[in-house]
Image (cartoon, helix red, strand yellow):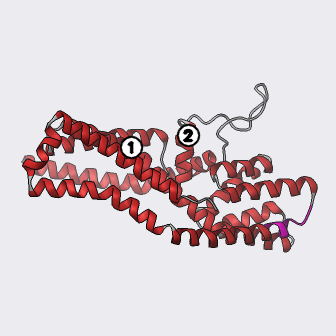
Amino acid sequence: MLLVVVTFVFFVALVLGTYAAVTYLPKFMAERELKQRLEDVSPLADTGPADAPALVIEDARGPVPLQRLIERAGVKATPQSILMSSLAAGAAAAVVVGLATPQTIAMIVAALLGLAAPFLYLKYRASRRLARFEEQFPEALDLLSRAIRAGHAFQTGMGMVADEMTDPVGPEFKKAFDQQNFGLPLKEALNQLAERVPLLDVRFFVTAVTIQRETGGNLAEILDNLAHVVRERFKILRQVRVHTAHGRFTGYVLLALPAFLAVALSYINPEFMSPLFHERMGQIMLIGGLVLQTIGFFWIRQVIKIEV
């Protein structure tokens, strides 16, 4: 009898849930998309006088640095959700390592890695997204230049770039285009574009457009020259990456080799590796080795990092 009642309740809940999802989910998604679009075109802070009516209010969604990192990563998340994910990942990593080994230091290291994992993921996504933006940026400049030569206004050309280009160039230009459409001065919209996309080429673009609008000049020719410079920088950058590939690979090997040897020796001869984890001196040496390995890895990264 109990099984029949549970089955009946389950199917009734399934039918009602499906009906609610079909009825209310499209409206909820549309409202969420509208809210997200309004948040995207709102500046992070009011730059006007204190007693002047603000076009937009100060962003209250979370800390500005974390919010900026989320925007650069192109992730649909809030600072609060990232912080909660960090705490959950840290706790889960500590519990898993605690079940595998009773070492307190291992649990602490796992918890710290879990706490840092969401932020490292955001930084990785942001760096990859900026790299894609920089690679697509010359095409956007060419499209904007052709639109201006065809007789369109600069704002119309920005709209064309927003519609024609894919992520991340299209969405970023879409935000700037929507901001100036909602009443924000074009100069401020371009400055916020340069803040969201911290690339030297974008700052050149914003500066060139600002100067041209104040003093005049052939903007289409300026954009063509800027696109040519960006492409030439990319050619040099690819050559530099080829020449520094050996150094990058060396850094990865030096970072992974001690950990691989530690795991292998733990299986081959556990008694030989036991003092490293159980003795006080062994734990100090282990922490020192991790710190020195990390410093050496970032040192190698800085040595082979060549600004172009």
Could you tell me which residue is drawn at 45 percent across and 64 percent down?
Answer: 247
Nearest to N terminus: mark 1 or mark 2: 2
Q: Is residue 130 visible?
A: yes
Using the rendered view, name the quadrant where residue 280 is placed: top left
Task: Work out whether 87 lies above or below 180.
Answer: above
- Residue located 70% across and 66% down the image: 161
Residue at 13%, 53% (x, y): give it: 266
> Magenta residues?
217-223
How many marks are shown on the rendered structure? 2
The answer to if 131 sits in the magenta stretch is no
Where does residue 170 sit, x and y in percent of width and height? 64, 63
Q: Position of residue 229 (x, y in %)?
A: 73, 68
- Tell me if 93 is positioned left or right of 297 in this view: left
Q: Which residue in the structure is indicated by mark 1?
A: 116
> In the rendering, at what x and y percent does residue 241 appear?
53, 68
Residue 184: which numbered mark, if any? none
Identify which residue is drawn at 17% across, 43% down: 276
- In the displayed structure, would residue 163 be above or below residue 10? below
Q: Secondary structure at mark 2?
A: helix
Q: Which quadrant does the C terminus fall into?
A: bottom right
Which label was assigned to residue 65? 2
Q: CA distance from mark 1 to mark 2?
A: 15 Å
Q: Is residue 65 left or right of residue 229?
A: left
What percent of the width, then of the height, locates residue 134?
62, 63
Depth order, front residue of 99/32: 99
